[in-house]
Image: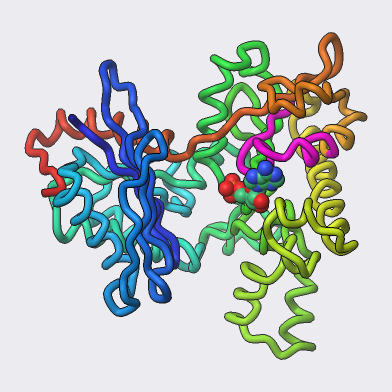
C-alpha cells in the first residue's frame, strides 16, 4: 500500500498523519498521532482511522531532547513496528515568504531559502525545518514537499499586501502575508461540492480555533485576511492578542523594561482569551466558567469577529455567504449563534435548530445570506499537494526511495 506521511512540527511536538493512496489519487486517512512534550515529558500517542489505539508510550526527557530526534523516533516506529514506508512526506511550513505561492518539492536549495524566513516566523519556522533537514540527511531520495500557511494568500493585491511603512521594509519581506492558508484553501476547494451556489462568489471564512483568523474569498481566491506579517494580528486567539496598537509594544519596552524576547513570549503565550479572562485559553473552559472575565473574553472574541466581518465585507464590496470552520467554528453552537447575530446587518439570520445540530447550513431558509459550517482538513490538503507534486517529480526523477 502506498502511503503519504504528513508532518506538522512545532516547538515541542511533532504531529503526524498517514494517508493511504487509493485508486484515482484518492487519499484515505489511516493513522493520526503525535509526539508531544519534547524536551519536557515526551510521549508518543497514535491511533488508527477508527480511533483504535496504536501507541501510547512515554520517554525519558533525555531520550527526546529536540524535534529532530522526535522525528527519528516516529520514523523508526512507523517503519519497524507498523511496516509503513511512505512514498513521500508532506510538511506544514508556516512561512513561504514573498515568493512561494504554492507548495514546493524540497531540496537543499529550498531549505536554504526557507531558512531565510526564520526571522519572519522565529517561533515556528525553525521547528518546521528541523524534521525536513533530518529526513533530507537520512533519506536524501525520499520526496518531501513543503506546504505553506502563507501561499494561498499570495493572490492578494498590492493594497492588501502592504503596510504604510517605507518601501525598503516591504522589499525585505515585511508584508501582510496572512496565515491559515491551508485551511482556507481546503475550504475553497470544498465549496464547489458542498455549496456550489456560493463557491465563486464573495465569501468570508472564519477559521476559529486556538489560532483564529478570517479570510475574504472571491471566486475561490483569497483577497484579504485578518492576519498580516505574523500570526499575531487580527482576531484575539487562545493566547495571542490579535490586533494591537504598536504603541502597546513600545509601552511594554519603555515603561515595563521588557526585552524583545519577553515581549515575544508575552504576545504569543500570555494574551488573547487567556490574558483577558485570566481563566483559560480554551473556549470550552470559558463557556463553562461563571467568572465575569471569562464572559468578557467571549464577548470580546465575538465582537472582534463582527468588526472583522465588516472590514472583509468592505474588501469584497458585499457579501454572499459566511463559513465557520476549525475547533470553535465547527463545534460551538453558542459562539456561532452570537457571531451570526453580529452579522445581522449584513443580512445573516440563524436557524437555531440547524445550528444546534451542527448542520452544514445554519441560516434561516428563504432570505439573507447563507451561513455554513464546513469542517476543515489541513492535513488532507497537505497530503493532496504532496501526492500531486510527487506525480510531477516522478516524471523528472525515476529513482524513488522509501523511508526504509
Ligand atoms: P483547533 O485549534 O481548531 O483544534 O481548536 C481548538 C479550540 O476549539 C479550543 O479553544 C477549544 O476549546 C475549541 N473547541 C473545541 N470543541 C469545542 C466545543 N464543543 N465547544 C466550544 N469550543 C470548542
Side (left or right) of 370 relative to 267:
right
Closer to us: 297 or 46: 46
Side (left or right) of 117 relative to 363:
left
The residue at the point 40 percent across, 53 percent down is 15
Image position, residue 53 (x, y; %): 36, 46
Tell me if residue 30 comes above or below residue 192 in the rendering: below
Membership of 324 in magenta stretch: yes
Image quadrant in which you'd find residue 380: top left
Side (left or right) of 403 relative to 183:
left
Q: Which residues are magenta?
A: 322-338
Image position, residue 120 (x, y; %): 51, 63
Image quadrant in which you'd find residue 83: top left
The residue at the point 58 percent across, 80 percent down is 261
Q: From where the camera sits, is residue 146 visible?
A: no
Question: In which quadrant of the rendered image does the N terminus lie?
Answer: top left
Q: Give the main secondary structure of the magenta stretch.
A: helix
Q: From where the camera sits, is residue 236 visible?
A: yes
Closer to us: 152 or 189: 189
Tell me if residue 352 comes above or below residue 196 in the rendering: below
The residue at the point 82 percent across, 12 percent down is 365
Amino acid at each position: 500500500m502506498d502511503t503519504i506521511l504528513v508532518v506538522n512540527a512545532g516547538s515541542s511536538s511533532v504531529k503526524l498523519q498517514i494517508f493511504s493512496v487509493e485508486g484515482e489519487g484518492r487519499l484515505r486517512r489511516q493513522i493520526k498521532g503525535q509526539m508531544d512534550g519534547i524536551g519536557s515529558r515526551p510521549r508518543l500517542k497514535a491511533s488508527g482511522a477508527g480511533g483504535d489505539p496504536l501507541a501510547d508510550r512515554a520517554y525519558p526527557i533525555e531520550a527526546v531532547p529536540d524535534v529532530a530526534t522526535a522525528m527519528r523516533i516516529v520514523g523508526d516506529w512507523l517503519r519497524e513496528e507498523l511496516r509503513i514506508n511512505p512514498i513521500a512526506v508532506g510538511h506544514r511550513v508556516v512561512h513561504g515568504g514573498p515568493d512561494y505561492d504554492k507548495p514546493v518539492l524540497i531540496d537543499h536549495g529550498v531549505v536554504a531559502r526557507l531558512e531565510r524566513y526564520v526571522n519572519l516566523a522565529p517561533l515556528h519556522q525553525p521547528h518546521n525545518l528541523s524534521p525536513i533537514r533530518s529526513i533530507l540527511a537520512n533519506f536524501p531520495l525520499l520526496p518531501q514537499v513543503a506546504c505553506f500557511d502563507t501561499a494561498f494568500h499570495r493572490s492578494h493585491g498590492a493594497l492588501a499586501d502592504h503596510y504604510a511603512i517605507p518601501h525598503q521594509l516591504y522589499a525585505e519581506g515585511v508584508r501582510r502575508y496572512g496565515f491559515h492558508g491551508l485551511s482556507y484553501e481546503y475550504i475553497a476547494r470544498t465549496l464547489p461540492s458542498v455549496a456550489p451556489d456560493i463557491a465563486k462568489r464573495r465569501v468570508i471564512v472564519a477559521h476559529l480555533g486556538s489560532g483564529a483568523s478570517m479570510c475574504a474569498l472571491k471566486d475561490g481566491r483569497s483577497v484579504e485576511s485578518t492576519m498580516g506579517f505574523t500570526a499575531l494580528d487580527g482576531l484575539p486567539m487562545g493566547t495571542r492578542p490579535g490586533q494591537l496598537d504598536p504603541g502597546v509594544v513600545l509601552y511594554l519596552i519603555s515603561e515595563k523594561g521588557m526585552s524583545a524576547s519577553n515581549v515575544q513570549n508575552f504576545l504569543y503565550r500570555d494574551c488573547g482569551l487567556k490574558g483577558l479572562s485570566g481563566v483559560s485559553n480554551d473556549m470550552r473552559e470559558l463557556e463553562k466558567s461563571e467568572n465575569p472575565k471569562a464572559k468578557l473574553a467571549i464577548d470580546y472574541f465575538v465582537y472582534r469577529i463582527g468588526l472583522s466581518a465588516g472590514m472583509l465585507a468592505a474588501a469584497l464590496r458585499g457579501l454572499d455567504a459566511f463559513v465557520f470552520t476549525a475547533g470553535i467554528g465547527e463545534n460551538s453552537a453558542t459562539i456561532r449563534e452570537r457571531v451570526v447575530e453580529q452579522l445581522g446587518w449584513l443580512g445573516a439570520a440563524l436557524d437555531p435548530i440547524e445550528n444546534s445540530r451542527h448542520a452544514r447550513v445554519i441560516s434561516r431558509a428563504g432570505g439573507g445570506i447563507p451561513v455554513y459550517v464546513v469542517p476543515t482538513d489541513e492535513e488532507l490538503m497537505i497530503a493532496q499537494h504532496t501526492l500531486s507534486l510527487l506525480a510531477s517529480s516522478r516524471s523528472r526523477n525515476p529513482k524513488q526511495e522509501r523511508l526504509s
